[in-house]
Amino acid sequence: MKKVIAFRPLLLAAVAGAIIATGCVAQESKKGMNDPPALAPLGPPPIPADNLQSPAKIAYGKMLFFDPRLGGDASTGCSTCHEPDQGWSWAEDISRGYPGTVHWRSNQTIINAAYYSKLFWAGSSKSLESQARSAARGGVAGNGETGIMEARLALIPKYVELNKKVFGTEWPLERDAFRAIAAFERTLVQRDTPLDKYLLGDKTALSEEQVRGKKIFEGKGGCIQCHNGALASDEGFYNIGVPGVKRWEYDGLAQITFRFEIYAKGAPEEMYRTVKDDPGAYFRSKNKWDLGKFRTPSLRYAVYTAPYMHSGQFDTLEDVVDFYNVGGFAADGRTTGFPETKSPLIKPLGLTDDEKEDLVAFIEAFSGEEILMDAPELPPYAAIFTKAELQAAQEAK
Amino acid sequence: MGVRVTSGHRLLAAMIGIGMVFGAQAAKVPDLGPLPPIKVNKAKAELGKRLFFDKRLSGNAAIACSTCHDPKQGWTQNKPLSDGYPGNGHFRNSPTLVNVAHKKVWNHDGRIGTSLNDMTREMITEDYIMNMDMRIMQERIKQDPVYLEMFKDAGYGEPSNGKVRKAIPEYLKSLTSRNAPFDTGKMSASAKKGMKLFKGKAGCIQCHNGPLASDGKAYNTGVPENFDIFLDPNNHQAFISFAMFQGIENYMNLKRDPGFYNVTLNKADIGKFITPSLRELKYTAPYMHNGMLATLDDVVAFYNNGGGKDSKKSSLLKPLGLSKGEQKDLVAFLLSLSGDQLTTAEHVWQGGYPAEYTAIKDWKNVRN
């Protein structure tokens, strides 16, 4: 049984009048499965009181997001892995990694990430600000460090100028760079999907097929138990039976990262030796009953973010629906490496082919137009001192 | 992620300070001489050799130790400032690694005074050197069947990052001078004259003494700054990151390499650098911590002028009044301290590396 997740008033307090129904309250343990929060139109994203939005901050954050100099060897920025034309994600089973590595999980989209109170597949990060920090540092992600990052920012006059304007310090701090990136990410939201329009009263916004699919979603399919509220995510943790990354069985580079992650996240020795699947939320609690559990993802923007699940094992939404329909097994019969923690909510659904089609059509209603964006022009480095200043310092020695 | 200056270093710094005072007063210093032999464990050194030339020891798998300590370039790089990790530059000259195991303090500023094990860790993990998360390194190594075998043969058992930091130093021990005319006694007449000057009129022996021709202490010789550190943002970023991490105040405005000050945080130590060994200079140009002197002729001319310009310059340096001929002899002597280049299979890994990581078979059923 999953733990009851505390309501986060701090984040939500900042959003006056917004419709926030990100489902911060656990359903499984508290309520019957009859009354999960209804699907709802998405309101504006919560803005933390200590990192308010401003145009200059967003512009600074956008450049930083697209700037590969944030990564250790200056080749790997946020957008390197979160490509706007790959759904602000990465369209392979597991994400590309820092050069010389591959990641161990599927990439996640940035679109609507602003609404989560727990980020990453296993919910290990509590804000976009701290998430950006983890992303920039991780050895298979940005592989950067504070010193080099702050030094690079200081050597880019445009960033010094923008930072000063936004944060007031003479030299850019890494911490503020992450705040700016978070501010930019809070602009990457989509609130005008067919479903939003439909829920706001435009009954023509969904096709008949999709309306039927919605019923299945809320009824026979049982999807609403976890994918509920405005975000279509309760942010709860479940093991729904997703199999591990197939590539681990035959790809040496992927095997390296798998062991590294298990080791780095502090698995006990015996677990490091024997585990063959991603323990997921276990690493947060170190409780056996959290093995193989992952945060319910939003279904918004999913049309653009294939492949699906933490291990990227499903290429299409049809595959996902088939997976649920048989009670949490892939077409080849593979399932989670931790069957003992699998959610009892996942069971064979008995959907007909037509019902499956309707359900897929409805999931598509969570996505609007594709959000594309050109990378901004990135400002160059420039020396801080002139030759004359250096000569004067030399003379004064 | 550099290595912090530990209290051990501070202690060392204090000792060095005291040593200097004695050195200056009592002109009795150890003579030059042959290097004592070092015992090397062959299997461990062989493993260390393979690691030293392996690019997979860097974060993005693009550079190896040998990129900056290149056997064909005297185990350094023949340019003033070392390369950095890709995307970065550096702010110092890469030191030769020949005889490095005979040293007691490492780096131009002497900030590592513990062991080559610590030195190796610094090189592997430092952002602007190899930028490697050693936990990833360990798993990469475990993915290579050749390493599994070699670690076993070396008596290390399963590969780990701790053992990498033992094997590489073991290999570094094998990099020692051999057949230098100074050691074999086959010095030219000019070199012999130069040695006399070195120990006498030129006063070099005051600091360059003992088997390495280095007392391992720090002095300010007034070497001019290398402006490329500051004019090239790639170098400057490495410098800023270094100074920030070492806790040097006002690092954004720093226009000079603080040198030994970094170890003591004593203003008197600004611009001091550790006396380098004078062995193998034939292959290691350019010279000084920042490569500012291109040739040995330049170095000798520099000393003949009494060193560079710095208000904190060592009082041991004064204009020497050496004739052109004497300067030549001194250079001839310096060259007699260089032996064979260590560029054969004995010191250089020739075995190559696999282009890809082989997958572990039956992965689901074997232990990780």
Image: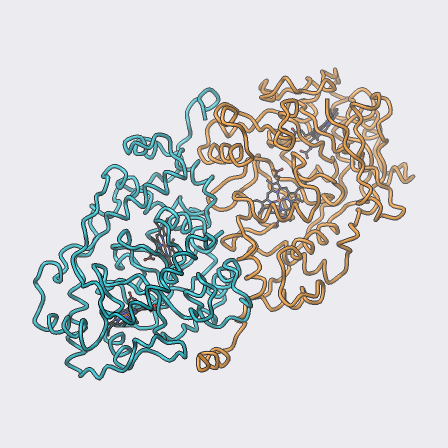
Chain colours: A orange, B cyan
Q: Residue at x 73, y 49 (%)?
A: A188
* In the depicted structure, whether residue A112 falls above or below residue A63: above
Q: Position of residue A267 (x, y in %)?
A: 54, 30
> Seen from this angle, which residue lies furthest right?
A201
* In the depicted structure, whether residue A186 falls above or below residue B311: above
Which quadrant of the figure contains the C terminus of chain B?
A: top left
Left/right of residue A384 with respect to residue B304 in the rendered view:
right
* In the depicted structure, whether residue B246 falls above or below residue A41: below
Q: Residue at x 26, y 45 (%)?
A: B349
Left/right of residue A36 with respect to residue A103 in the rendered view:
right
Q: Position of residue A338 (x, y in %)?
A: 60, 21
Q: Position of residue B334 (x, y in %)?
A: 19, 68
Give the image quarter of residue A177. bottom right
Between residue B57 and residue B197, name the one nearer to us: B197
Q: Residue at x 85, y 46 (%)?
A: A13
Q: Position of residue A124 (x, y in %)?
A: 65, 37
Between residue A367 and residue B221, name the one nearer to us: B221
Between residue B258 and residue A69, name the one nearer to us: B258
